[in-house]
Image: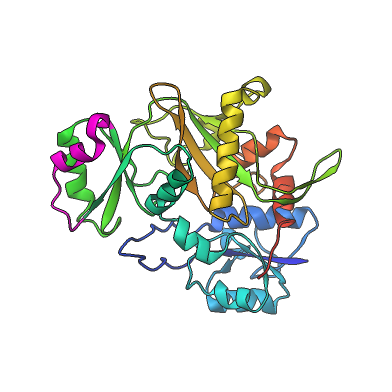
Amino acid sequence: MTVGVLYQVNLPPLIDGIPKPMKPEGYADSGADIAFALNNANIKIVTPVVEPNSKIQTQWVFADTEEGICIALSKGANVLWLNTVLYSSHPIEKYLNQGGWVIGQDPVCVEKYDDKWQTNQLLKSHGLPIPHEYIINRSDKFQVQTIRDHFNQNFSFPFVVKPIRGRGSIGVTMVHNEQELNRILSFKLPSSEFGDAVILEHYLPGQELTITVMPPGNYSFKSKDQYYSDYWCLPPVKRFSHKNGVAPYNGTVAVIKNSQVLTDEEIEDSVIENLMFQCTKAAKLVEARAPIRIDCRQDVNGDYFLFDLNMKPNMTGSGRPGRENQESLSALAAKKIGWSYTELLLNILQQAWKR
């Protein structure tokens, strides 16, 4: 097995009038973390240059273009790690249709389930707890009364306004009254950054947990190997120190400063066990081929809701010089079961798949 790691270099196409914002440098940072860690674990990798500098992230990863993919393959890669934003017309489709091996999600599924509105409707239709929400289109004549009628007796501030194809907490805003709501919508809806519609969602004020769900497959632990026939969860991670009700983007505040894995006692609580089961059910519904991460939060009554499903969880990790505080939420969770960041990656690598 020889691995080449891809990163995003272009904006994805508009899908139904909705864009997905691009991360600056297109996940080259986490891609370099992945390649560096695999290389140190004696996994054969290919890189754009013969001796990549650990501090220059683009020397570890290949562009997710047709040219970049061809270069990685020409250097000997036979497994491509899709550390990028995917969609049905992505250049990787040609490679997949030729039987190539990958780590990551199916592009067709990502295009479908990166739409947070459609995904939540799917989860809701299968009995999973989703917050009350409403979609506001640019073409609609926005009126608060229309939203009041939709929510009926459930209409009460605060709400959260968020993009349909968002990235992390970018563009997610809490509004406390009609004036703030009108002001935010008058800014977001005309903006090309978020497209033709946004989601208005009831704000959940309780504890926030994020849960990484792993796909079925063989996994290696220190004491034994284990086969999982179904989706399973890494330990939940609680989030705190929110800003205006929203967990800050990890590029602004490192997650190790505002996140903590639950204790054994907390994980064994029947409420948390049920929440983890609900997350595995969600992963199955979206046909996850690689780890996904689901953000959950309690309402005023203490009931948990699944409010954000992420098809591409952040996968940064410590290892490269200067990256000591860059553990991702999934890497934090993995430590609880005895996996280092590298061991998490090695186990993800074992789930390589092809069409």
Residue 119 higher or lower than 111, as above or below:
above
Q: Which residues are the magenta region?
A: 138-158
Residue 207 higher or lower than 333, as above or below:
above
Q: How is the image coloured?
A: rainbow
Whether residue 149 appears in magenta in the rendering, the answer is: yes
The quadrant holding residue 203 is top left
Whether residue 89 appears in magenta in the rendering, the answer is: no
Would you say residue 325 is visible in this rendering?
A: no
Q: Residue at x 29, y 50 (%)?
A: 198
Q: Is residue 322 left or right of residue 142?
A: right
Q: Is residue 111 left or right of residue 235?
A: left
Residue 301 higher or lower than 175, as above or below:
above
Give the residue at the far front of this rendering: 126
Q: Residue at x 20, y 49 (%)?
A: 187
Q: Residue at x 68, y 39 (%)?
A: 334
Residue 121 percent location from the top left of the image: 40, 49
